[in-house]
Image (spheres, rainbow, N blue to C red):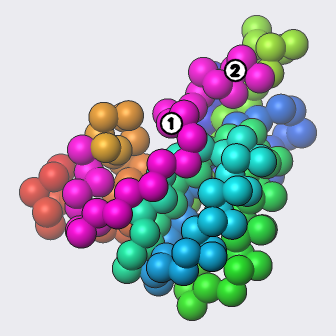
Amino acid sequence: FFCLDTTEGMTGRFSFRRSFIWFHHIYSPKKQKAIARWSSELEISGVMRTGKPGIMLIEGESTNTNRFVVQIKALNWQKMTVNTNQDFELPKDWEGREHEWIQSMRKFKDLERHDTEKLLQLVPLFEGVDLLDFFWEGTRMDPNKYGKA
């Protein structure tokens, strides 16, 4: 398959998007419930770390992922930034099997909630699903500084 590490638009073909979102904090139970509901409705999977800072790695069909970001932005955050995206276009040999392809691209079954004390406690999780580079890029942390390179 073909990957674009960009926030630019796709060519109009069916696509999959993975986004890394940074929050000043995620504490509000009301916001967390809305996030859980919308992720289920839009078939978004990934990881949400509550606390300060809060992070989310979300993934799913691109239109749904973009809609999810718009919905959570409307929740009035102190600070929320989409730090990086990965976009993948449907390979021609998967045409007609779009849903199956989306499932094959997922690293997570649903939106997993993690209440870790420290952000770096998520490193083994991201490493285990081969997204460690995406973690470092999304957090804008230097892995060399933490002896993780």
Real-space CA distance between mark 1 and mark 2, rounded to the nearest whole angstrom:
14 Å
Which residue is located at x 83 percent, y 32 percent?
Answer: 14
On the image, the x and y values in percent for residue 31 come to 62, 74
Q: Amino acid type of disc 2? A: Trp
- The answer to whether 121 appears left or right of 33 in the picture is left
Residue 115, position in %: x, y? 34, 63
- Which sits in the foreground, 42 or 134? 42
Q: Closer to the N terminus: mark 1 or mark 2?
A: 2
Q: Is residue 123 among what the camera can see?
A: yes
| Residue marked by disc 1 | 108
* Picture residue at 77% right of the left edge, 47% below the top: 42
Give the residue drawn at x 87%, y 13%.
Answer: 96
In the image: residue 41, left or right of residue 5: right
At x 59%, y 28%, the residue is: 105
Q: Which residue is mark 2?
A: 101
Q: Which of the pair 20/140 is nearer the observer?
A: 20
Residue 122 magenta-highlighted: yes
* Amino acid tagged 1: Phe
- Residue 97 sits above or below residue 64 on the image: above
Q: Residues within 10 Å of mark 1 (few under 14, many from 20)?
A: some
User: Looking at the rendering, in which quadrant would you find the N terminus?
Assistant: top right
Element assignment for label 1: loop
Label 2 sits on a secondary structure element that is helix
As displayed, is residue 35 above or below residue 122?
below
- Span of residues in magenta: 99-124
Q: Quadrant of residue 52?
A: bottom left
Does the rendering let one see residue 92? Answer: no
Residue 20 picture location, percent across and down: 53, 59
User: Measured from the top left, where is residue 104 in percent x and y?
Assistant: 60, 21
Q: Could you classify mark 2 by the number of other residues whose Cα lies within 10 Å: few (under 14), some (14-19), or many (20 or more)? A: some
144 with respect to 72 (left or right): left
